Every structure is written in C-alpha cells, then in structure tokens.
C-alpha cells in the first residue's frame, strides 16, 4: 500500500488509486497520516476539521466521516482503528512518502558529508522527487497547513540545496542545474545558499562574467558574504568557443497534473523510443482529436524516457493549428541556438542550417519533441538523422510521408479511466476560482459533505443524502459518459463545478443531456470543446464534410461499409478514409467504423448541402 501527503493526497495499491472525494474525509485522513501509527484524539480531529469551532454534533459527525473514509479506502480502510478517545492509522514507514523522504534525505546528507557526491545526488534527487506538489495540496485544513507546511517545506529546500551541492561536482549535470538554480534563486531570493550555488555553477561552466550580475538579480549584493561551495576547478571552466559549445538542454514542458490512464500507449512509446533501429532515429507520431491529450501523452512519455538521452531533450511548438504555423527554418534556428551554436555562426539559408543541425546530432543521443505539427512537410526537415536520437511528434491528423515513423492514435478515454480522471479533477479543483489549469492542484477543493459549514449545526442523520447521491459514483459516471471520453470535456466539467459550488455532478450531467446546448455547456474560459471540433470540420473537403454530417444523422456508434454505401452511395470509401485520417471515425476492423458520440452530436448540427435522401433500407443495411 502507498500513502502520499507530499502533494495531493494519494492512496493506492496494485489494484489502483482510492480517491476520497469529500473534503472533510480528506482532512481526517491527512491528520491520521501526519501521526502514522499513533492515536489522534477525537477532540484534536474536531479542532482540525472545523478550525477550532466544532459544532455540537461534532462527535457524531466525526464518527460518520471515519466510517465513510474506511469505505472509500478499500482494503486500507481496515487499518483505521478506533482507540479510546480517538483514532489510529496503522502504516509502515516505507508506505508513507513523507517518511521515505526524510529517510532518503538523511542518507543523502551522510553521503554528502562523506564526499560521495554521485551517491548523495542520487539519494537526494530521489527524496526531492517524492514531492508531487505543495504539501497536502487538496486538504482544506488551515491548522494542518500552519503546523506542518513550514517545517516540511524547509526540509525539502534543505535537501534540494544539498542535492545541487553534490551535483556541482558532477560535470555532466552542470548545464541542467545552472538553469534550475536560476529558477530557484528567483523563487527563493531569501535563501543565500541558492545564490552561492548559482554563482559557483556559472563560474565552473566558464561563464564567470555572468556570476556577479546573476547574484545581484537573485537578491544578493556586491558585498555579500555568501561563500561558494568548495569545488575543484575542472575542464568545464575553460571558456567556450566563440563559434560552438555543445549545450545539454532539458527543455520538456512540465508534466500535466493528474495525468490518468494511457498505460498501453506509454509502454509502447517507451519501448519504441529507447530501442531505435540501427541506422535511423526512432520516430513516433501521435494523432487524435483536439482535447484528447496528445501533448500531455507526449510529455509524459518524453519525461519517462529522458534518462535514455544523456545529450538532452529538445522541445519545439510548431503551432500547426494556428493561422501561421512555425516555419521549419525558424525552428531550426531556435534548435541550433539551443544546441550551442553562436548567433554569429548561424547559417543564413535553410539548407545550410539543416546540414549543421544533422551534423551536430549525428553521434549524439537526443530526444526531440515536436508539438502541434501541421503536416509532414513541416516536420520532415526537423527530424534528426542520427540513429541514437528519437523524435516524438503530435498532430491533429495522421502524418503520411515520414519514413519509418510509427503512428500512434490517441483514443478517447475508456469509461473507467474517464471516471477516474473526472474524480481526480474534482478532488483537486479549487472552489469558485474558474477553469482548472494544467498546473499544480489548488489547496482547497469542493466539499461534498453536507455539514461543512463550521457555523452551522446539522444533525448527523441529515448531513448527507441528497448531495452525496448528486455527487456520488453514479452521478460522476453519468457526467463522464456525457463527456464522451474526451479529456478536454472532463476538464471543462470539473472547472464548471469548481466555479459553481452550488451545482452537483448530477445537475451538470442533466444539462449536458440536451444536444442543443451540449457544446455551450462544454465551454469555460479558454477551454472550448466545440472550437476544437470546428477546426477539424473546417479541414475536411466538401465530400468528406457532407459524409460526416449525413452519417451523424444516422446516429450509429458503429457501422459497416455496406451501411455507409447505402447512405452515401457507392464509392464512398475515399470519403470514409479521409474521415478516419481526420480522427472523425475510427477504423475498428476492415470495413467497420466507430463514430464517437460527441462527434455524432456535432455532425448533426452541421448543414448537409444537397444531400440526397437515404434509401429506405439504409438503416437496416449491414
């Protein structure tokens, strides 16, 4: 069993995660996890739950919360034991992330003191890596945050300082930690140690002139007494060439929070990218509908295999869905600068840039992520040629004409994964703050318990019921079904519920039941399901667009070629192929097609110009 408090609450075993949707129950669990194996008095739990002002019914309500929490945690629920005057959670030290963090941080400190820098860096990176976000990110308990956050956050920053101190002795990490230290000094200007480490990193990498300025920008002064770490000078201190000095960059965007599912695709991508063919780079092209999570999957896969590419990871947004996609020559310029080519040495013409780019990567192991590609012509000049490299490409439609590229269609989420993602989004969504972002979860979530108001005394037998049912598993399943397995739609629903605490999942599911206003409901802020589908529709040629609208009116989740010919006429296979390439249809088997629900609804809302009436027996055809 695994329990986590270094970020959103996490409870999982080999069978999967056990989400706790109700905020009050999360508070109880967090209070027990912070005292593992030790009794927590009921009076203390009540004080934490209601921030020092428990209602008269606190004792009974607390028993109800504990009872429901045991049910939510599955097999782990039996570990919550009732003790005289309180409750206890049985847990082994290795099962709780904060205890593993403290143990790894202590081992790393001892290794650093002994001069074992590689071992210290490894242990401390493991310790810091256990933090998935702010402490207790989805637990709305002011008392716990006041008591625990400062202490544990200080332990994390201290471990990070020691980790970077150890890594400064490892030349291959120098470029990466310099970039990391710039961010840390900006985020924590009060920590003198980060400023001293940044100064040392710049000087060791041969960039001595930058050190004083960086120190001042980070909050230090020219007269500061910050002492640099004791580091022996090495070859990295030699000044770089004025023309070229290869830089190892790790440019991957941060991973999307609450990434859910996609295990088969992740395993397949990892295997393909890390076992390239002997004479060419490994290339994978991820395609799918707008909002299905192509970029998120590519980012997750890239982070998973990044260690297999010691010469760096490069990222470029090709802006293929915008009015002005990025020109390959412009992208090559950016990549060459990232690789260390001096501006004055950049070739002027695209052919010369391409030749230099491929020469630099010929004998290196670099992973390239090309996001939002327009077409194969835009991608082809950007692909590395060295067999040790790999490339991940995302595009709305399939990209033909990339030799050796493995196509990976990113499907809509299966029903179970859609429900799980929606549950996690709702658990992490801040109340009344608008759209759910892809960043770290906010510290407060919608409370689905009925008596969460500390100033209101609600009898224990009336504090749940209607609201629990309205936000319970059946309601969440209905809402997830209305979203048709599209992650973007699920995020929109979570954002709408977060912005409207008075709404329930059941009410929103009922609103989505109307086809006339479905897409008006699936929009919040910049998140807009209809806009993505409209972009797909506009890319279709007239014949394919007409076939799309007429097939949608037939309203079949799946159909065969014979049915399509009866509806569209003989020779419709070319139009069907274009719809498959655009991800409007899925080719489930030869001459058999799937038609997702959201697309059928959208298609029925599109005009059919001069559409002949379907034959009477069309609906009965195969």
Image (spheres, helix red, strand yellow):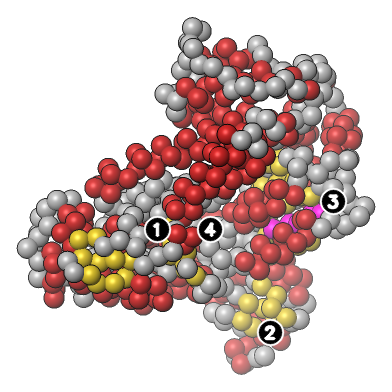
For marks 4 and 1, the one nearer the N-term is 1
**Real-space Cα separation, disc 3 to disc 2, in angstroms:** 38 Å
Q: Are marks 4 and 2 in contact (CB under 8 Å)?
A: no
Q: Please name which of the two marks, 3 or 2, marks the residue nearer to the observer.
A: 3
Residue situated in front as seen by the camera: 429 or 566: 429
Mark 1: few, some, or many residues within 10 Å (few <14, many ≥20)? many
For residue 281, the mark is: 3
Q: Quadrant of residue 331?
A: top right
**Real-space Cα separation, disc 3 to disc 4, in angstroms:** 27 Å
Mark 4: secondary structure: loop
- In the displayed structure, 194 sits above or below 473; it is above
Residue occupying image coordinates x 70% and y 75%:
587
Residue situated in front as seen by the camera: 535 or 542: 535
What span is in magenta?
Answer: 281-286
Badge 2 is on which residue? Answer: 560
- In the displayed structure, 108 sits above or below 347; it is below
Mark 3: few, some, or many residues within 10 Å (few <14, many ≥20)? many
Badge 4 is on which residue? Answer: 259
């Amino acid at each position: 069993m695994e329990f986590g408090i270094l970020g959103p609450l996490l409870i999982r075993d080999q069978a999967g995660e056990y989400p706790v949707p109700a905020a009050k129950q999360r508070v109880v669990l967090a209070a027990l996890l912070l005292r593992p194996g030790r009794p927590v008095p009921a009076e203390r739990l009540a004080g934490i739950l209601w921030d020092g002002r428990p209602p008269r019914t606190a004792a009974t309500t607390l028993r109800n919360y504990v009872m429901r929490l045991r049910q939510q945690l599955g097999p782990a629920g039996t570990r919550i034991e009732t003790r005289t005057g309180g409750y206890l959670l049985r847990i082994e030290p290795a099962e709780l992330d904060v205890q593993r963090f403290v143990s790894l941080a202590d081992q790393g400190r001892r290794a650093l003191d002994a001069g074992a820098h590689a071992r210290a860096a490894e242990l401390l990176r493991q310790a810091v890596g256990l933090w998935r976000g702010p402490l207790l990110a989805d637990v709305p308990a002011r008392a716990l945050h006041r008591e625990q956050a400062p202490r544990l956050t200080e332990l994390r920053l201290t471990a990070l300082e020691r980790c970077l101190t150890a890594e400064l002795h490892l030349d291959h990490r120098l470029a990466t930690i310099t970039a990391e230290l710039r961010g840390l000094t900006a985020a924590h200007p009060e920590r003198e140690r980060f400023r001293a480490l940044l100064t040392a990193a710049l000087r060791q990498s041969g960039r001595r002139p930058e050190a004083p300025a960086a120190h001042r920008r980070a909050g230090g002064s020219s007269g500061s007494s910050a002492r640099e770490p004791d580091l022996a000078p090495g070859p990295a201190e030699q000044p770089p060439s004025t023309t070229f000095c290869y830089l190892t960059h790790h440019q991957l965007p941060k991973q999307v929070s609450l990434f859910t599912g996609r295990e088969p695709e992740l395993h397949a991508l990892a295997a393909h990218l890390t076992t390239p063919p002997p004479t060419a780079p490994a290339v994978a092209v991820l395609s799918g509908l707008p909002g299905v999570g192509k970029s998120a999957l590519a980012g997750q896969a890239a982070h998973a295999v990044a260690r297999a590419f010691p010469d760096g990871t490069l990222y470029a947004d090709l802006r293929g869905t915008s009015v002005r996609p990025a020109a390959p020559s412009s992208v090559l310029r950016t990549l060459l600068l990232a690789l260390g080519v001096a501006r004055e040495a950049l070739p002027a013409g695209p052919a010369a840039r391409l030749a230099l780019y491929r020469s630099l990567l010929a004998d290196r192991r670099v992973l390239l992520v090309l996001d939002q590609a327009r077409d194969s012509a835009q991608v082809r000049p950007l692909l590395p040629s060295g067999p040790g490299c790999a490339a991940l490409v995302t595009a709305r439609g399939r990209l033909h004409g990339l030799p050796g590229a493995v196509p990976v269609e990113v499907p809509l989420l299966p029903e179970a994964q859609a429900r799980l993602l929606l549950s996690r989004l709702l658990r992490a969504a801040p109340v009344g703050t608008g759209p759910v972002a892809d960043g770290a979860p906010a510290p407060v979530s919608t409370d689905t318990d009925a008596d969460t108001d500390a100033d209101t005394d609600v009898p224990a037998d009336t504090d749940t019921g209607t609201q629990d049912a309205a936000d319970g598993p059946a309601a969440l399943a209905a809402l997830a079904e209305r979203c048709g397995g599209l992650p973007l739609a699920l995020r929109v629903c979570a954002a709408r519920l977060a912005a409207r605490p008075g709404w329930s999942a059941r009410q929103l599911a009922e609103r989505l039941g109307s086809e006339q206003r479905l897409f008006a409901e699936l929009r919040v802020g910049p998140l807009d399901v209809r806009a993505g589908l409209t972009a797909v529709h506009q890319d279709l040629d007239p014949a394919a667009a007409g076939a799309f609208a007429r097939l949608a009116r037939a309203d079949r989740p799946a159909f065969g070629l014979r049915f399509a010919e009866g509806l569209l006429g003989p020779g419709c296979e070319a139009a069907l192929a274009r719809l498959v390439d655009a991800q409007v249809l899925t080719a489930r088997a030869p001459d058999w097609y799937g038609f997702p629900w959201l697309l059928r609804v959208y298609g029925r809302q599109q005009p059919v110009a001069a559409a002949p009436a379907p034959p009477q027996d069309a609906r009965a055809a195969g």
